[in-house]
Amino acid sequence: MTKKRALGKGLSALLENANTDITTKNIGLESKTVGSISTISIAQIEANPFNPRTTFEEEQLEELRDSIAVHGIIQPLTVRKLGRDKYQLISGERRFRASQLAGLEEVPCYIRIANDQTMLEMALVENIQRVDLNAIEVGLSYQRLIDECNFTQEQLSKKLGKSRSNITNFLRLLKLPAPIQLGLRGGLISMGHARALVSAGDEDKQLSLFERVIEEELSVRETEALVKGTKQIDKATKSTKSKDQLPTYLSDFQTRLADQLKTKVQISANNKGKGKIVINFESENDLDKIIDFLDQ
């Protein structure tokens, strides 16, 4: 039995869909059959407007160009039929661009029929399976599948063969401030750094810690420890403020009352206006003085 070639789980499922994988239909008078592998002129192929990949490393494209110039294209592109002698990429844009750089006039292609919705799914799912897509591009691909293809995170998990936590972690990166996202895309920090910064607090705190990570070249573990330490300090500060800090008018009254009673006075109050006054005394004589003062 011939072993099927491995595809990304989601892409494989999409390509097996009867609505997108038609193996016997011809379009018009074209000799190229939908569902087959055919050689197509590069001039007849246009780029995929749904491609989530937004950056292509020039050095990697040149390396792929050199490989294609020597060995040709090993894995065919996937295109959809738009009309007579006109096709649009579904997947394989790096190979397509490298083929142009190599001066090829024709490339081997799988030919599919796909509407815009299905094409978007196919392009996004195919790209998610690639290891060289940066974390922000993966997160954006997940978000587009949720927003534009109406997938829930659970459905996305099953379609892609990814855990829910994996999908959630990538989506959380999209909440980071733009400078941090750019730093992740540009390789200044890793996904581990970014995941730590997500839980650092508000945007100002995230940006401040991001700058420290870059300046001090902190490891992921050091970044996690920094974020954890900062959160503990913030928690302690917040707790102190909630216990000790009084509105000005109550603080002034506390001071005046302590001066008049010649003893320590503590006033506490919550946001709803409820609170208590504690008056300390060291002896019965002190207590009698306080009572006399209050009876006036």
Image: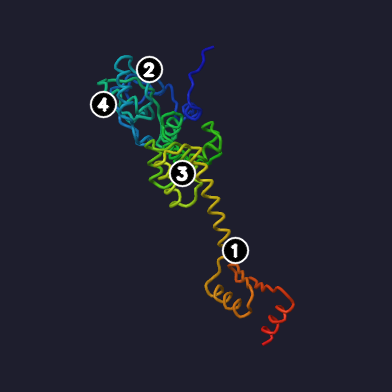
Mark 4 vs mark 2, foreground winner is 2
Circle 3 SS class: helix
CA distance for labels 4 and 1:
72 Å
Mark 4 vs mark 1, foreground winner is 1
Q: Give the side of residue 201 with respect to residue 37, left or right.
A: right
Residue at point 41%, 32% (across, down): 133
Q: Residues within 10 Å of mark 2 (few under 14, many from 20)?
A: few
Mark 1 vs mark 2, foreground winner is 1
Q: Which residue is mark 1?
A: 243
Amino acid on which the number 4 mark rests in the picture: Ala
Q: Decide which of tag 3 and tag 2 comes sooner along the chain.
A: 2
Amino acid on which the number 1 mark rests in the picture: Lys
Q: Decide which of tag 4 and tag 3 comes sooner along the chain.
A: 4
Circle 1 SS class: helix
Which label belongs to residue 209? Answer: none
Amino acid on which the number 2 mark rests in the picture: Ile
Q: Which residue is mark 3?
A: 147
- What colour scheme has been applied to the protein in the rendered image? rainbow
Circle 2 SS class: loop
Q: Which residue is mark 2?
A: 74
On screen, 73 above or below 50?
Answer: above
Query: Percent position (x, y) of residue 66?
Result: 30, 19
Which label belongs to residue 43? Answer: 4
Residue at point 37%, 37% (across, down): 186
Q: Are marks 4 and 3 in contact (CB under 8 Å)?
A: no
Amino acid on which the number 3 mark rests in the picture: Asp
- Quadrant containing the N terminus is top right
